[in-house]
Amino acid sequence: MPGLTRRAVLTAAAMPLVGCKPKGQPGWTGGWVGASHERGHRMRDLGKSGRLPEPAVHRQAAVLVVGGGVAGLTCARELAAAGIDDVHVLELEDKAGGNSRSHRLAGFDCPLGAHYLPVPAADHDTGLHALLESFGLCRHEHGRWVFDERHLCHSPQERLFFRGHWHEGLLPMPDDDTAALAAYRRFSDEVRLAGQVAGFALPTSRVPWTAAHDALDGMTMAAWLDARSLHHPLLRAYLDYCCRDDYGAGLGQVSAWAGLHYFGSRHGFHAPGDQAGERDAVLTWPQGNGWLTERLAAPLQDRLHAGRIAMKVEPSRDAVTVDAWDAQAQAVERWTARHVVLATPLFVSVRLLASPPPGLAAAVGQMRHAPWLVANLHVAEALNDPPGAPPAWDNVIHGSAMLGYVDAMHQSTRPHPGPTVLTAYWALGGNSLAELQAQRARLLSPEWAPWAEAVVADLAVAHPDLPAKVRQVDLMRYGHAMSIPAPGVRGSAALASLSRAEGRVSFAHSDLSGYSVFEEAFFHGQRAGRDIARAFSRASAPRFPSPSPAPRG
């Protein structure tokens, strides 16, 4: 949760990372996990040089999907359902899943990124319900979807450390602050009005884009709040947290459309004490959304090729050629496919294509991607909890530059608290491009220990006994974790053009929606798969000669 002057808080938190260490030696081990970022930079650097080694292996596929995140895995699944089984997936990391991969630390499963999926609305496109049903998460009974409670987040779901105590929920509300309550109610009214005028939904394609959306997409959330004189620091702090939580950056970078979409597409916004429906249920697991991507990837078996760095994609009239670096074999392999799906961030796709379409270059020019740090902390024994609300799944500290932590063991049924893994999240997009670039540079420095120390120190504000109980800190860094829906991105005509299937190369990534959540990635993977399946069906349909013209009388 940000403080009243978030820039000062974040800068102060980051500065100790450059050459400063606290007194004494921490009692934990740890380090970076996941593939080194240099693996991805190899594609960029070799692409610039124009000198690739000759291929050592030649392979073929009906469809080649580049990128094994949610969109790429969904696309492959959709093609298999359509009877196209010669589908192969190339993945940069050693494990598929993208931002939804999982990790294992000290015998505990834990996430390396996304850690929950909101239960889709009843009127949601049945594709996502069908996926969840196939995984045994829900069933359709008497005209409605019923979800398995074992996979729904156990109560309590969330709490906030505020003024020395834990409080239920994440909205800070002092008992004596009538100005804060008035600001919350005014914002609630504004969210309701924006929903009536523009409309919001997940995936975003379910709502036609209108001039009202364009107006919201043309300004930052901070500017929108300023125009309505919504300045109360507690409201601004909460909304800044929400923007960082979903979009990786603060009110000064995220568009007003995105800031309102956060509430309008889900449960709305309700001031304390106002009548509200139940909080949206969420599906979650100790390993986060890795539970989902592991099941999406499982049917691919040996058709999933990890540790592959796509270097160059060249479409021709009859096929597409893809050169990829095999990190294990230290050699180039060349793939030839009838169709290629680039399920990669758009800034990667534009580098892969020798002649990218104009819309791709234009869209990439508008986009920014937020760096993230995900820290998994093995805690050897239960923490001493301050007074207030009991331990929850999601635990946020008001005034922190971080986003708080989730407890990997919250979903367990053990009768007493004990050792666990806490997964802490730090969105580093900031409130300006300069802040984003500076944070990314710090994050990609080789030293891991200062980041671990900063994370532990931040959480120790609520848990002073934490530093003595931490045994290991594993850190996952994402230099370009997610697209930030900055003003002008979501409403970009160039971005919209990339969702239309043209030629032998398709695009499927959450970047096409301007921000990164499971629902958007799933939608674009499903759309691309269905488009290709239809194209294959047309190409294989029998063709009959045109009837001869009738003789003239």
Image (tube, helix red, strand yellow):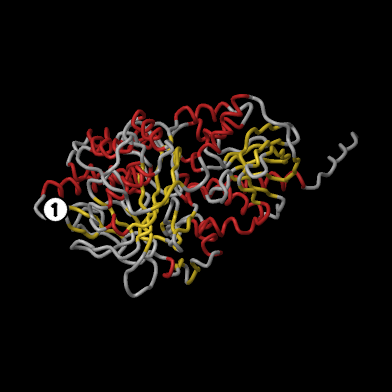
Residue at position x 83%, y 40% from top? 546
In the image, taking residue 386 as reference, residue 376 lies left or right, namely right
Question: Which is more toward the observer, 437 or 551?
Answer: 437
Question: Which is more toward the observer, 405 or 72?
Answer: 405
Q: Which residue is labeled 1 in the image?
A: 174
The residue at the far front in this view is: 24
User: Could you say where residue 296 lies in the image, as x and y percent from the top left?
Assistant: 57, 56
The total of numbered circles placed on residues is 1
The residue at the far left in this view is: 176
The residue at the far bottom in this view is: 415
Quadrant in which residue 258 is drawn: top left
Question: Which is more toward the observer, 220 or 212?
Answer: 220
User: Could you say where residue 216 lies in the image, as x and y percent from the top left?
Assistant: 34, 35
In the image, taking residue 448 as reference, residue 268 lies left or right, namely left
Q: Please state which amino acid type lies under the numbered disc 1.
A: Pro
User: Could you say where residue 330 lies in the image, as x and y percent from the top left?
Assistant: 66, 40
User: Could you say where residue 86 lies in the image, as x and y percent from the top left?
Assistant: 72, 50
Name the element at disc 1: loop
Question: Which is more toward the observer, 25 or 462?
Answer: 25
In the image, taking residue 231 as reference, residue 531 lies left or right, namely right
* Mark 1 neighbour class, 10 Å CA radius: few under 14, some 14 to 19, many 20 or more: few
Viewport quadrant of the C terminus:
top right
Quadrant in which residue 388 is drawn: bottom left
Q: Is residue 157 above or below residue 191?
A: below
